[in-house]
Image (cartoon, rainbow, N blue to C red):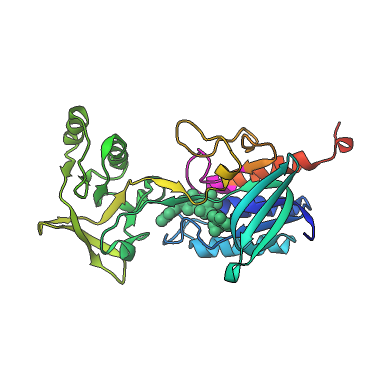
Amino acid sequence: MEKIYDCIVIGAGPAGLSASLFLARYLHSTLTFHNNSARNQYAHGVHGFLGHHGISPAQLLARGREEVEEHGGLIEEGCVTKVDRLSDDRFRVTTAGKEQSTSTFEARRLLLATGLRDLTPDCPGFREFYGISVHHCPDCDGYEARDKRIAVLGSGTKTVGFALSLLTWTDRISLITNSESADINAHERARLASFDIQVREQSIAALEGDGPSGHLRGVRFSDGDLLECDSLFFNLGTEPASGLHQMLHCRLDPDCGLVWVDHEQQTSVKGVYAAGDITPKSQLAIVAAAEGAMAAIHIHQSLIPKERKL
Ligand SMILES: Cc1cc2nc3c(=O)[nH]c(=O)nc-3n(C[C@H](O)[C@H](O)[C@H](O)COP(=O)(O)OP(=O)(O)OC[C@H]3O[C@@H](n4cnc5c(N)ncnc54)[C@H](O)[C@@H]3O)c2cc1C
C-alpha cells in the first residue's frame, strides 16, 4: 500500500471524469479507474450535450481524460472487483490486472460512477444498426426520428408509455414484441389504436438495411413479413454495470432499483458517493456529468478539516 488517496473514483464515463476533474481542481489526490466499457460506446454521437452536441462518445471521453490528467488526476485502466469499507473514512479497492494479478488501493472517499448496461435485442443485424438507426433513448435520439417510421420493440405497460412518448416526433409508429406476449391490457390497446399504433407479436428473423451506413430499412419477421421502418427503439431494460454498490450495502431507490443518493450525491453508506446512470435521475451524459460535479463538490466539503470551517 503506497498511499491513501483522498478519493477513488470508479468509472471514467461523463460522471466519473467530471467528478475527477473537479476533485483534481480542488487539489485532492484522486485515482480514477475504468474498464473501457462506457455505456454509449455504440452511439454515433452524443446528442443534447450543450456545446458538444454530436461529438463522438470516444472523443468526449478522450477530452475529459486529458483535462483530468492536465490537472494532475490519475486515470488507470483496471476492473475493480472488490470494495471494502474499513471505516467511515477509509475504503479499500481491489483491481484485477493481467494474468490474474490483483492490486489494492485505499482512499478516504469513494465515488461509484460505474453506469448501467443496456439489455439489448438478440436478433441478427442488431449491432450493424445500433447507435445509428436503432436506439433505446427517445430523449437522446427522438429528434433524429421525427416524421420517420418507427418500430418500438418491447412489451408491457412500460413499452406502451414508451411508444406513446415517441408521438412527440412522429405518428408513424408500430409496436413489435418479438414473439413475447404483448402483455398489454384492453385500455392500453385502445390507447395505442387511437394513435394508429399497430401491435405485432411475431418473432423477428433479422433487422434489414444498409449495413455499412447503419441505416435500417425494416424488420423481417420469421413468417417472412417485412415491417418497413427507418428506426427501431427498444425498451428492454438495463442493469447496473457492476455490483460494487451491493458489496458496500448501499440502499437502493425503491421505485427504480438504482442506487439511492441524498442531495449531496452521498449514498446510504457514509463516505461513499454515487453519480451518473447508476443513480435515479435521467440517464443522459450531461446529467451524469452534472451529478459527477455535484459529488465532487460535496466530497471536497467533507474532506475540509474542521479548523478550516466556521
Ligand atoms: C447507444 C447509446 C446512445 C446514447 N446517446 C446519448 C445521447 O445522445 N445523449 C446523451 O446525453 N446520452 C446518451 N446516452 C446515455 C449516456 O451514454 C449515459 O447517460 C452516460 O454515459 C452515463 O454516464 P456514466 O458516467 O454514469 O456511465 P458510463 O458512461 O456508462 O461510464 C461507466 C464507467 O464505469 C466504468 N466501470 C464500470 N464497472 C467498472 C468496474 N467494475 N471497474 C472499473 N470501471 C468500471 C466503465 O469502464 C466506464 O468508464 C446514450 C447511451 C447509449 C447506450
- Depth check: give the residue in front, 39 or 209: 39
Q: Is 56 displayed left or right of 161 in the figure? A: right
Quadrant that contains the N terminus: bottom right
Please identify the residue farthest to the top as the structure is shown: 187
Number of numbered callouts drawn: 0
Q: Position of residue 145 (x, y in %)?
A: 31, 52
Q: Is 299 displayed left or right of 279 in the figure? A: right
Q: Is residue 65 above or below residue 5?
A: below
Q: Answer whether residue 110 is visible to the viewer in this image.
A: yes
Residue 34 falls in which quadrant of the image?
Answer: bottom right
Q: Does the magenta run of residues contain 310?
A: no
Q: Is residue 35 above or below residue 82?
A: below
Residue at horizontal 55%, vertical 61%? 35
Please identify the residue farthest to the right as the structure is shown: 307
- Depth check: give the residue in front, 177 or 4: 4
Q: Is 143 displayed left or right of 170 in the figure? A: right
**Residue range corresponding to the magenta coloring:** 274-289
Q: Is residue 252 above or below residue 67?
A: above
Q: Position of residue 294 (x, y in %)?
A: 65, 42
Residue at horizontal 48%, vertical 63%? 56
- Depth check: give the residue in front, 251 or 204: 251
Please name the predominant secondary structure of the magenta segment in the image. loop
Q: Does the magenta run of residues contain 281?
A: yes
Residue 157 falls in which quadrant of the image?
Answer: top left
Q: Is residue 13 above or below residue 100?
A: above
Q: Position of residue 42 (x, y in %)?
A: 42, 61
